[in-house]
Image (cartoon, rainbow, N blue to C red):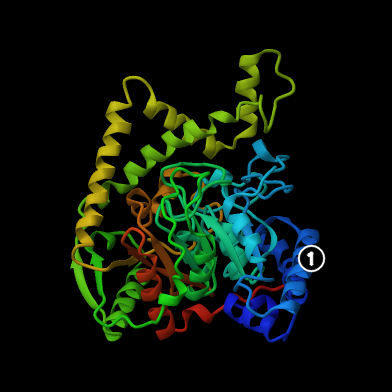
């Protein structure tokens, strides 16, 4: 087995048994990146020198002790909207093309404390705005299963890197599905924790009441390992709400006998891919055979979730991106003759079309005379959606749905129609609106024009109860073999 194809568990065990070193696994991953990333374009920057230094330090620790954490010496990729001191952090935008972060974000500090080897920064939709990683100012990422298709977004680079064995695991951010949707389309595992479980300090903000950082991994247990390492309260993030450091990994047994799984009827909609619906219903039967109780439930305000999301999110985008004015930092138009022109041209040239579209939409919904009709009403409906989840969780322990309504689509297929692209988020935005945790894991493959494309299953849980959905996901993963399949990429 190639070292780059290992899971966290396998790599950690091998390092402790001295079967290979951190330097060797790091070099294997760097070689894999060099071999396939010309085709995949998962990375915006590869931190080869920094990775080698971290790997050597990890080997020194491993030489002295055998009790270090599970992430010690293991290569990880960061979505390029997370700050790491001394490295370029672009958020895939011309606005930050030359921005060198002066500090580590909290999740980066957590990984460094664990001794992880940060191998590079991955591609994304500009400022995390998109569902295909086509909005990057530095070119699109390809889906490792079919290079003509998108990997999903906005964490498409992270998901593609994990799927293509260009890292052992990665971090992404999820505002409306940006971890789970690309994980589904790339055939890997993606966890969006409860809002507030993981500090957002050092994450370049998109929509502050929705953003959350989480892991993208090859297995469910790997996701739990990373989640345990990065979760916890942080005084630098006022929304970081929990200080529980108990191991989630230790609660994963795979025993789900008596677990009550709710299946919301609103998630089986007209127009969704029939093979995804079939795979989801087959997964339900797997859970039934494992001893879970399947219960039909309703989330009646689901039909409004996408509209609510695309009002609240652009409003927060408009506020958060106001700081990029061409004066303090970021792209600056050097030809401007006055201050007004400087603002206008710096933002026009620095932001891409999708970012400008969302800023305009958000500014409109917050403007005088429209805030009551749109933004405040959306917040009221958001409260109804939260109540839907709260009521459902009085009946069940977790919810099961498809992750996406469609398979990975061709690059360029939906670029000209933003509304069609926004529909990619239809099954994932509700978890962000309600703040509950969600996980996507592989549940099958569909054949399209000679290529097998992955499909994803989503589980959503109660606030702060990642343990239940991780255990339920693990039980399904162990009963199937979807997670062991890897794309065959020609180098």
Query: In this view of the protein, can residue 187 be seen by the observer?
Result: no
Q: Residue 104: x percent and y percent?
A: 65, 49
Q: Is residue 471 above or below residue 190?
A: below
Residue 344 falls left or right of residue 247: right
Q: Residue at x 75, y 63 (%)?
A: 51
Q: Is residue 429 left or right of residue 40?
A: left
Give me the residue at 25% from left, 67% from top: 263
Quarter of the figure that contains the N terminus? bottom right
Give the SS element for disc 1.
helix
How many discs mark residues in the rendered view?
Answer: 1
Q: Which residue is mark 1?
A: 52
Residue at the outermost front position:
64
**Residue placed most toward the observer, 3 or 416:** 3
Residue 338, horizontal then vertical, whole percent: 67, 13
State whether residue 193 appears in this view: yes
Count residues near mark 1 (Cα–Cα under 10 Å), then give few for <14, some for 14-19, many for 20+: many
State the residue at coordinates (48%, 70%): 224
Question: Quick one: 229 or 98, which is closer to the camera?
Answer: 229
Measured as percent of width and height from the top left, residue 272 is found at 34, 62
Q: Is residue 234 above or below residue 484?
A: above
The C terminus, quarter of image:
bottom right
Residue 374 position within the rendered picture, expressed as x and y whole percent measured from the top left = 31, 31
In terms of image quadrants, where is residue 209? top left
Taking the spot 36% from the left edge, 75% from the top edge, the residue there is 472
Q: Height in image: 402 above or below 206?
A: below
């Amino acid at each position: 087995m190639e070292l780059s194809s290992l899971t966290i568990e396998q790599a950690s065990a091998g390092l402790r048994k001295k079967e290979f070193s951190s330097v060797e696994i790091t070099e294997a991953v760097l070689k894999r990146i060099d071999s396939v990333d010309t085709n995949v374009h998962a990375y915006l920057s590869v931190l080869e020198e920094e990775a080698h230094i971290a790997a050597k330090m990890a080997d020194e620790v491993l030489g002295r002790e055998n009790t270090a954490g599970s992430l010690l010496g293991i290569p990880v990729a960061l979505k390029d909207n997370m700050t790491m001191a001394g490295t370029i952090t672009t958020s895939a935008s011309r606005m930050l093309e030359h921005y060198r972060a002066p500090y580590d974000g909290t999740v980066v500090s957590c990984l460094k404390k664990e001794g992880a080897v940060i191998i590079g920064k991955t591609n994304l939709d500009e400022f995390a705005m998109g569902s295909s990683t086509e909005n990057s100012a530095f070119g699109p990422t390809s889906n490792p299963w079919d290079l003509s298709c998108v990997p999903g977004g906005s964490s498409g680079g992270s998901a593609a890197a994990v799927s293509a064995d260009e890292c052992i695991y990665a971090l992404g951010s999820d505002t409306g599905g940006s971890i789970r949707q690309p994980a589904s389309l790339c055939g890997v595992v993606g966890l969006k924790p409860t809002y507030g479980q993981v500090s957002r300090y050092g994450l370049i903000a998109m929509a502050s009441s929705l953003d959350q950082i989480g892991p993208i991994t090859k297995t469910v247990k790997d996701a739990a390992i990373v989640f345990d390492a990065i979760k916890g309260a942080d005084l630098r993030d006022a929304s970081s709400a929990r200080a529980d450091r108990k191991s989630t990994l230790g609660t994963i047994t795979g025993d789900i006998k008596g677990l009550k799984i709710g299946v919301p009827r609103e998630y089986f909609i007209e127009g969704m891919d029939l093979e995804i619906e079939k795979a989801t219903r087959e997964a339900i039967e797997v859970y039934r055979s494992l001893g879970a109780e399947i219960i039909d439930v309703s989330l009646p305000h689901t039909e409004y979730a996408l509209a609510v999301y695309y009002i609240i999110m652009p409003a927060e985008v408009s506020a958060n991106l106001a700081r990029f004015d061409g004066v303090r930092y970021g792209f600056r138009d050097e030809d401007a003759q006055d201050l007004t022109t400087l603002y206008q041209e710096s933002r026009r040239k620095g932001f891409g079309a999708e970012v400008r579209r969302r800023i305009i939409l958000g500014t409109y919904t917050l403007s005088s005379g429209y805030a009551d009709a749109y933004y405040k009403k959306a917040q009221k409906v958001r409260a109804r959606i939260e109540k839907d989840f709260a009521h459902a969780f009085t009946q069940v322990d977790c919810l099961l749905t498809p992750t996406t309504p469609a398979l990975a689509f061709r690059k360029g297929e939906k670029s000209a129609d933003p509304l069609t692209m926004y529909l990619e988020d239809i099954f994932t935005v509700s978890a962000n609106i309600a703040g509950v945790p969600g996980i996507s894991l592989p549940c099958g493959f569909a054949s399209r024009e000679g290529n097998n494309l992955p499909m994803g299953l989503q589980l959503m849980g109660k606030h702060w109860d990642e343990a239940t959905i991780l255990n339920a996901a693990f039980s399904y993963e162990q009963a199937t073999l979807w997670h062991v399949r890897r794309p065959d990429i020609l180098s």
